[in-house]
Amino acid sequence: MEGSTKQFRKRNAILACLQQTHAHPSAEMVHEMLQKTHPDISLATVYRNLAWFKSQGMIQSLGTVNGIERFDANTAPHVHFVCTGCSAVIDLPQIAVPHSLEADTEKYAGCRVQGCQLTFTGLCGSCANS
Amino acid sequence: MEGSTKQFRKRNAILACLQQTHAHPSAEMVHEMLQKTHPDISLATVYRNLAWFKSQGMIQSLGTVNGIERFDANTAPHVHFVCTGCSAVIDLPQIAVPHSLEADTEKYAGCRVQGCQLTFTGLCGSCANS
DNA sequence: AAGAAAATGAGAATTATTTGCATTTATTTT
DNA sequence: AAAATAAATGCAAATAATTCTCATTTTCTT
């Protein structure tokens, strides 16, 4: 056997695309980025595979920005900044949500916390100067 | 003149509806809640007025839960918990995002922060026991 | 009361996303 | 290695939340 060299070529391309960018792309952005190397990939396949990776916990969704869902291959919890001008999403790996807030949430809401998302909004550097 | 008693009756009803609930309703939930008192209100009017209140900064959007936008009459920044089981949204007024994180964000992302949203996800009390 | 402006209802239009189904590609079995 | 099975894909149609158009009604101004 020669390994899994050719398995799931398009699926792999979609995941690789997400892993190689920091743009937190939408399905359509992923589709467009793949046009160069995989011009025959269908938008439905991109949607299907993003949903599949998400269900497997291999990627995460940031929710929607302007009604469009954005994805991130980095599944570790981390903070984001979303620009209301250009819809860019920027990672903030330097910032952490204090652990104690999770315990407080479980206490006050009587719930079991599984995830956490902190998003700052505003104008990015370029949009602030224009 | 007898005041503004009858002005914008439906618009007012929509805002009052949002202010009287802690359910963080969607447009359709607002429409349904209003059926009892305003059975002739149209869903388009609910959407239109929610968008208008939002543009005026009188309400805020929590973003989408399961692809559906949810609204909150409380415009003060506060933390939310979203149940992945029943899509309920719970306020956590007891919890605050440390102020320093905003300054850190501006520093690391080179941006101007205008808003902040912290959302915990997981299972609410009822959904955890089922 | 008349005229201007704003709000509304009804349904069509829009748009991101999902789905059905026939076909292609990969994996397993013999 | 060929046949049989399972998974992945493309295409186009279907969904579903939201927005928009336009004729009508309500409210505000004068």
Image (tube, coloured by chain):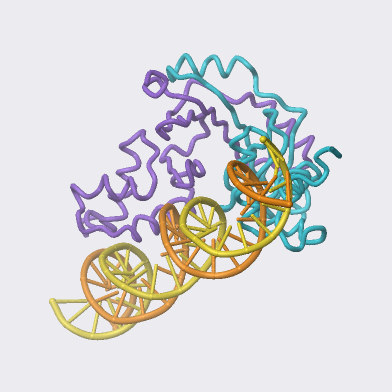
Chain colours: A purple, B cyan, C orange, D yellow
Query: Where the C terminus of chain B falls, by quadrant?
Result: bottom right
> Would residue B9 be found to the left or right of residue A93 on screen?
right
Residue at position x 26%, y 44% in the image: A33
Residue at position x 76%, y 45% in the image: B7
> Would residue A88 be found to the left or right of residue B82 on screen?
left
| A10 to A20, vertically: above or below | below
Of residue A127 and residue D23, the one placed in the foreground of this image is D23
Residue at position x 27%, y 55% in the image: A10
Q: How many marks?
A: 0
Of residue D22 and residue B106, the one placed in the foreground of this image is D22
Residue at position x 25%, y 48% in the image: A34
Indicate the position of residue A85 as horizontal and vertical percent values. Answer: 43, 30
> Would residue A81 be found to the left or right of residue A114 on screen?
left
Indicate the position of residue B10 as horizontal and vertical percent values. Answer: 73, 51
Indicate the position of residue A49 as horizontal and vertical percent values. Answer: 38, 56
Residue furthest right as drawn: B2
Report which quarter residue B77 is drawn in.
Answer: top right
Report which quarter residue D1 is drawn in.
Answer: bottom left
Query: Where the N terminus of chain B falls, by quadrant?
Result: top right
Of residue A15 and residue B46, the one placed in the foreground of this image is B46
Indicate the position of residue B18 as horizontal and vertical percent values. Answer: 74, 44
Of residue B9 and residue B86, the one placed in the foreground of this image is B9
| A18 to A121, vertically: above or below | below
Report which quarter residue B73 is drawn in.
Answer: top right
> Would residue B91 be found to the left or right of residue A120 on screen?
right
